[in-house]
Amino acid sequence: MRDLPLSVKAYATLDGAGNGTASTGPESFGESWSALTASVSVATNASEATCATYAGAAPTPGYFADATTWGSTGDSTTNLPVVKVGGQVWATWTGGDPGARATLTVTGTRTVA
């Protein structure tokens, strides 16, 4: 098995109410992500979004990792489990600026079998 650095991004455009969801996860057979940090931000912050971070199997996140009232200006969490193929890291924003681009950045270790 090889351990490689992980740095991936997922994006969402916030809807008319300022809500949106972005997710990303391992896609290759035998791949897992560990020692994860999930960082969230939104391109604008006239309305500061709240954001919750989860991990779990698609299409429904199961493990609540963390929440922040700084979902637009930026915050991060390391309270995430190992994510294997079929799982995702999710960020769900509420109350941000409609039409703004939200970013979920996941860093850590990518293990490939």
Image (cartoon, helix red, strand yellow):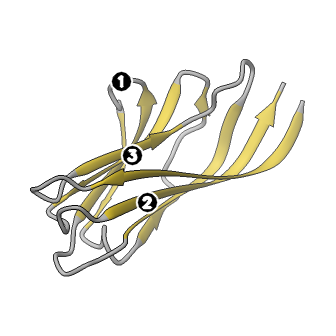
Q: Residue pushed farthest bottom?
A: 46
Q: On the image, numbered disc 1 is attached to which residue?
A: 59
| Local crowd size for mark 3, using a 10 Å CA cut-off: few (<14), some (14–19), many (≥20) | many
Give the CA separation, mark 1 to mark 2: 19 Å
Q: Say above or below: 28 vs 17.
A: above
Against 58, residue 98 (above or below) is below
How far apart are the two marked residues, 1 and 3, measured between alpha carbons? 12 Å
Q: Whole-percent x and y of residue 93?
A: 25, 56
Q: Secondary structure at mark 1?
A: loop
| Image coords of residue 12 (percent x, y) | 36, 51
Check disc 3 and report the residue beneath it. 22
Does residue 82 lie above or below 106 as drawn?
above
For this view, does 98 lie left or right of residue 64? Answer: left
Left or right of residue 51: residue 88: right
Q: Is residue 55 left or right of residue 99?
A: right
Q: Secondary structure at mark 2?
A: strand
What residue lies at 60% left-to-right and 51% top-to-bottom? Answer: 36
Q: Is residue 60 left or right of residue 38?
A: left
Which three-letter amino acid code belongs to the residue tagged 1? Pro
Q: Say which amino acid is labelled 2.
A: Thr
**Nearest to N terminus: mark 1 or mark 3:** 3
Image quadrant containing the C terminus: top right
Residue 34 lies in what quarter of the image? Answer: top right
**Residue bearing the label numbered 2:** 103
Which residue lies at the image location 69% right of the left edge and 32% below the top edge?
32
Asked which quadrant contains residue 3, the reply is top right
Whole-percent x, y for residue 99 in the image: 23, 61
